[in-house]
Image: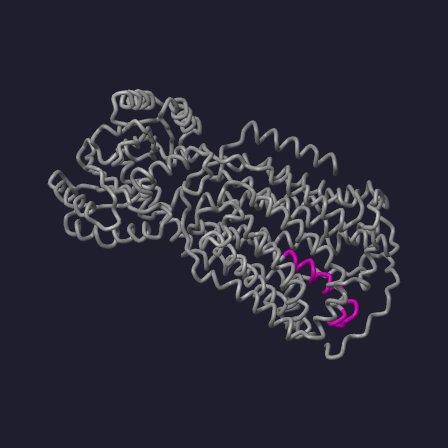
Amino acid sequence: MLLLWLVALIGVIALGRSFGGDTTTSFSLPNVESQQAFQLLQTRFPSSAGDSAQVVFATSAGVQSPAARARVTQVLGQLAHLPHVTGVVSPYSGQGRRISASGTIAFATIQYDQRARDLPKSVGQQLVDRAQAASGRGMQVEAGGSVVQAVVRPKAPSSELLGVLAAIVILLIAFGSVIAMGLPILTALFGLGVGLGSLPLFALVFDMPTFAAQLAAMIGLGVGIDYALFIVTRYRQELHAGREPEDATRISLMTSGRAVVFAGCTVIISLLGMFLMGLSFVQGLAIGAVTAVLLVMLASVTLLPAVLGFTGRAIDKLHVPGLHRDESAHRTSLAFRWSRQVQRHPWRFALGGLTVLVLLCIPVLSLRLGNSDAGNDPTSLTTRRSYDLLSKGFGPGFNGPLVVAAELPGPAARPVVQALRVRLEHTAGVAAVTPLQISPRGDAAVITVYPANAPQDVRTTDLVHHLRDTVVPRATTGTGVVVKIGGNTASGIDLSEFLGRRLPWFIGAVIVLSFLLLMVVFRSLVVPLKAAIMNLLSIGAAYGIVVAVFQWGWLGSVIGINKSGPIDSFVPMMLFAVLFGLSMDYEVFLLSRVREEYNRTGDNAVAVADGLAATARVITAAAAIMISVFLAFVLGDTRVIKLFGLGLASAIFIDATLVRMLLVPATMELLGDANWWLPRWLSRLLPGVDVDVAQLGVAAPVEPEPEPAPVGSR
């Protein structure tokens, strides 16, 4: 088995590097208006159908001086001959306002024949290289736009390494043994290595965003260590209870290993639900994350048992003084006493935890979906410096122009488009409008509109809707002229609204499928319903924290967020998919042990106390590892990765503390035996998946007498 994983790791990485596809920063939309505008230009005005880039020039001597003018003209002449460039609009061409009022900043537009997602990365890199080579000697030259954004990315920190280091420390504290600590790390790295190595191969079929690998690494590393941790903990418990290594391995796989498989399936179901969104780049994110989770889950139930066969009883060797403990003595733990305390006052703890969760959910009411612009990039990137120069010289809206594409029924329709241009020029919220461009055949026209506000500003969204709903219809109704508003800014708005409409269906589908899976696993209707409600509350609380930090700006500077803005439109969907699955992980870890104890004793109160005591340390350690892994990604420069990292870390912390250690034991105490209620007719229809230790053919160790249930318990 070990050799099989080694071959798989080397083979997949070699194949990915030799034949894999590239990642992308762009995406295609369904038949929304911005996509219709692109298709119109592609068929009627192909020279203007592709994406564009901006090259910004700044000099204190003034861009109109003869020396500056000569340098700018020379640079633009070089750019005009780059591959895929169909045209260059110079600041001195007279086509709209391209020189600032101060005369110190100017910009040129570089038009390409294809969209950024379809261009080779070398095309954008050549533009950046030429701009950087021209900068200096009193003139600053920066490049921006979607073509540049596709190749210029901030240097990613060693987040995976930081997460692994944090996991090593936590596992040493949890296990007190170097060998026991190393097993979950080894298993997760093998599974994650094969998973990440296969992503370039998936990029041949799916649109794989540039941050897909980071997201997959973040999720895969966290769940991989957790899954292996859960199995290793049960293995050590059985060893310490006096069983032989082979029996301990068998029991840990058939109990904790089974829970890992079901937990992994809930994560995969949640992630696969993103295919309902119908967007190729979202499917690419889902495939990347599913691959990582699937591979680390397989490693936990195949590679890990093989490694346990090598270690045997030596798993407790190289122990850390003062940290080694007996895993079977869970009834002397703090968690057992805590569970008993919660069971004595269930209403008090349940209402207290619920109040905190509801308060954290309040900011979700002001959630605004959108797309963050280049103004959120680090200042080390040319895209951010270009953004700042354009904002200073012309206004932030020049970083996100709108493309007004018109289909003309004939030459007689030109006055209609001219009148539309005048209306656009006098519309509130519009900073500038370029002259009308007519296609060579006279059947299409293009107008570029520069908003007064930044691309991510809510006022820009309102402007796009106003133009589509009011300005354009008033100018073109009954004329036969068809006008569509597109461009990257409009595409981002369309994407946000498209995902917003589909999000409730996605959430509903994930909840239903997860409910059915948990119903089969725990043979109960109450447990999966309660789990779904609690998971929704913990995810809502994480959403609230994300909105408060990234949209409201609360404590944003602490994590390097100096500019508030909307929540990227695909983030709530991704967070829900990941967090619902991960929350179900802890639910399965905890309740599978509770269910095992309930089957053995028939006493709900004792089963909850024993189940919580037996899994509290592993859940706490698993949560601490995940939080450390996710927070390590907050150190990066990419806003969306920071957002994911903080959202995931917040949700895991809330779920492992308020939910698993407080609300679950409190509500299970209040519900008593009703937790395990399932109609007999339904029970006969469900497949049996319960596996008790007695079924495995090994002798059970001597168990201590159950502690009497507390007064008032069920």
Nearest the camera: 123 or 551?
551
Residue plotted at (87% across, 58% down)? 699
Using the rendered view, name the quadrant where residue 184 is placed: top right
Q: Is residue 2 above or below residue 523?
A: above
Residue plotted at (26% across, 49% down)? 429
Q: Tell me the quarter of the image containing the N terminus.
A: top right
Q: Is residue 239 above or below residue 41?
A: below
Residue plotted at (57% across, 37% down)? 157
Q: Is residue 44 above or below residue 260?
A: above
Using the rendered view, name the quadrant where residue 89 is placed: top left
Q: Where's residue 203, x and y in %?
A: 51, 36
Q: Where's residue 223, x and y in %?
A: 64, 48
Task: Work out which residue is located at the far bottom of the displayed protein and give it.
Answer: 712
Q: Where's residue 178, x and y in %?
A: 79, 43
Query: Does residue 594 show up?
Result: yes
Query: What colour-coding does the image apply?
Result: one colour
- Magenta stretch bounds: 585-606
Magenta part mainly helix, strand or loop?
helix
Query: Does residue 87 show up?
Result: no
Nearest the camera: 136 or 477?
136
Q: Is residue 550 left or right of residue 615?
A: left
Q: Tell me the quarter of the image containing the C terminus.
A: bottom right
Using the rendered view, name the quadrant where residue 520 is placed: bottom right
Whether residue 153 appears in magenta in the rendering, the answer is: no
Q: Where's residue 534, x and y in %?
A: 58, 64
Q: Is residue 415 left or right of residue 233?
A: left
Q: Is residue 382 above or below residue 531?
A: above
Whether residue 600 appears in magenta in the rendering, the answer is: yes
Q: Is residue 436 left or right of residue 10?
A: left
Q: Is residue 50 left or right of residue 371?
A: left
Nearest the camera: 35 or 212?
212
